[in-house]
Image (cartoon, helix red, strand yellow):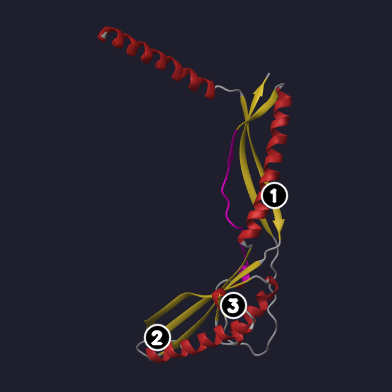
Amino acid sequence: MKMKMKWFGLCLLMVCCLVVPVAAADSSDIPAITVSGTGSVTTAPDEVIISVGVETTNTDPVTAQQENAKKSAAVISALKGLGIASEDIKTSGYRMYSHTPDEDSVFSGEKEVYVVSNTVTVTDNDVSRAGKIIDTAVMSGANNVNSVRFTISDEKAQSLRAQALIAAVAQARGDADTLAGALGVSITGVHDVTTYGSSTPIAYADNMAGGRVESAKFYAPTPIEAGTLDVTATVNIVYAIQN
């Protein structure tokens, strides 16, 4: 009885060894064409993200801090006056440091001055108000305009990515048909598909980035143009073929 069991186990092992390589060969030796396709959809942004800040300097740290607090509160209050919700105005940076002033500084001769910087980031879904937001912040006390970015909401990005994927698949299929025709083979189906991740597109208004506002003798509306953004998607498709 033991000999029969051993012989059965040996036969079973031999069958397994024979079957596994055959299965692997079947899955890896399928004749195929591999192509890539890219789709793109152009759209207008529906969100603007603006970073503005208040910087104050004084020989007394408490005075520098208190001046900054008052001006920053005035800026935030003015932005809320535009109808921007509190959750769309976020503190994105706060810094206080000291340094020895340069000779050409208004604090020249002082041993040490203190600088306080408070930065807020404003998000608004009305991109046409970008210039107005900047003007309101500056006129209420902001003296730094760090960046202006245009983007699209998550809901819009998801919808447009679906359109871009459809366009990418169409491009890939067109290339596959062309290759199949040139090779004299026919496409029998899709063997594998891979998509590539994408991030929400952002456009920067570079002329505003890092701007320091010293003073303004007269008021002129700040012109900011949103432009357009491209949502793209890329796919790799492996098409099975036969002669």
- Label 3 amino acid? Ala
User: What kind of element bears circle 1?
Assistant: helix
User: What kind of element bears circle 3?
Assistant: loop
Which residue is at the front of the view, 24 or 222? Answer: 24
Q: Is residue 201 left or right of residue 184?
A: left
For image coordinates 70% across by 84% down, the residue present is 220
Near mark 1 (Cα within 10 A), the count class, few <14, some 14-19 or many ≥20, is some
Which residue is at the front of the view, 235 or 217? Answer: 235
- Of label 3 and label 2, which has the lower sequence position? 3
- Of label 1 and label 3, which has the lower sequence position? 3
Image coordinates for residue 176, horizontal then vertical, percent: 69, 32
For image coordinates 66% across by 74% down, the residue present is 130
* Residue 194, magenta (yes or no): yes
Badge number at residue 85? 3
- Label 1 amino acid? Gln
Q: Which residue, given by chain and number where applicable, does mark 1 sit on?
A: 163
Near mark 2 (Cα within 10 A), the count class, few <14, some 14-19 or many ≥20, is many
For image coordinates 55% across by 22% down, the residue present is 29
